Image: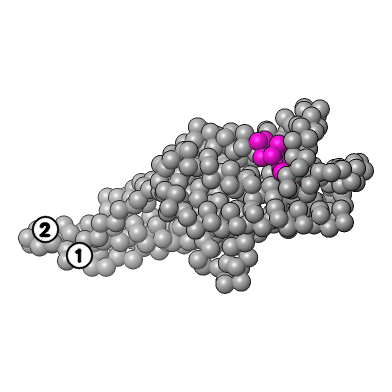
Amino acid sequence: MFKGFGSVFYKEIIQITRDPLTLMLMLLIPMIQLTVFGYAINTDIRNIKTAVYDLDQHRESRELLAAFQNTDYFNIVEYVDSDEALNHAIVAGRVKVGIKIPPDYSDRLATNRQATVLVLIDGSDSTVATQSLTVSNSVGMQESLSRITEQLQQNGLQIPIEMRPKMLFNPDSRSANFMVPGLVAVILQLVTTLLTAFSIVRERERGTLEQLLVTPIKPFGLMMGKLLPYGLIGFFETCTVLTAMRVIFQVPINGSVILLLLLCILFLFTALAIGLLISTKAQNQVQAFQMAFLIMLPSILLSGFMFPRDSMPLPMKAIGYIIPATHFIQILRGIVLRGATFFDLLEEVIVLTVMGVLLLILSALRFRKKIV
């Protein structure tokens, strides 16, 4: 069944070592991509440029502005003296948020009347706008609650309900802890798939594939002999990007490192099998790249790497389910962030195993058909 595996494996190793520049690029590209994109993709929105039009100019208004600034979300960079100047600062793009405090703000608070603060938000950037809206409402609620609590305590009373939410696994809500493991999965799938696809397509372009097909080498022997050398390279790449994730981005690994590495091997097997399947169809490296591109964008947009899959329409969720990166992202985030065990991730393990075996069998059958 695996006849010829050793010969193909040895030949592939020799082929790889004859091109040290390509080998070095294979090993460095995932590390470079992780470092660049790991810093670039950051959903932690801080220091939103803010302009202030303070008509009150008393201690209470200054305390309110300090409350805005202490959240670290707002950075007051400009004070204006008219409504027109406040609007112009937003239209000109110098600030994203404008805060207008009315002249009777402190007087109303002193007499226990409601004071209204106007917060203008630039909605052209929906992400910044949503964050600004949420935090500004939170600041207003927090300030109101502290005043009500103070009044109730003076009368010996307490607020009826006190919520005490507790953030598990990522208490600081660092986006790197969530995004970088997903980025590792996407990069590894893309690089390992292309590695295998190009290896066989290159044989076809050089005319040596036909020579291999007429030898006594069995299809599974040829598949595994081609797959294993790139699997070893992929495993080395996995170790380097996981080290970079831990050292450069300070993402803690709360689960078992051994389990993580074992499941990385399972994912690499599946990703390499995709490359094998592509190579059975592509006639040249350009076609191989275009076919690999078919799974590139879905791996980024439908795998849960950037957007939650639960909020996607059912057809999009179904497409995302057949992408290996979707399940590997669940495994990575489960082990790295939540300390999940093997049995917690059993469904993802079964799906990846079935995918890898089916893809390998399908690739071997297509090669057998070419031989016949």
The picture places residue 39, in percent across and down from the top left corner, at 56, 41
The picture places residue 38, in percent across and down from the top left corner, at 57, 42
Q: How crowded is mark 1: few (under 14 residues within 10 Å), some or many (20 or more)?
A: few
Question: What secondary structure is marked by label 2?
Answer: helix
Q: Verify CB contact (< 8 Å) between mark 2 and mark 1.
A: no
Viewer-nearest of labels 2 and 1?
Answer: 1
Q: Is residue 238 visible?
A: yes
Left or right, 204 with reference to 311: right
Question: Residue at 42% of width from left, 54% of height from top?
Answer: 344
Question: Residue at 45% of width from left, 44% of height from top?
Answer: 336
Question: What secondary structure is marked by label 1?
Answer: loop
The amino acid pointed to by label 1 is Ile
The amino acid pointed to by label 2 is Gln
Label number found at residue 153: 2
Label number found at residue 161: 1
The picture places residue 213, in percent across and down from the top left corner, at 87, 47
Q: Which quarter of the figure has residue 316?
A: bottom right
Q: Nearer the viewer, residue 353 or 100?
A: 353
Between discs 2 and 1, the one toward the N terminus: 2
Q: Which of 48 and 249 is in front in this view?
A: 249
- Please report the bounds of the magenta region as a residue range: 223-233
Left or right, 5 with reference to 124: right
State the predominant SS element of the stretch in magenta: helix
Label number found at residue 29: none
Q: Nearer the viewer, residue 365 or 36?
A: 365
Residue 292 among those drawn in magenta = no
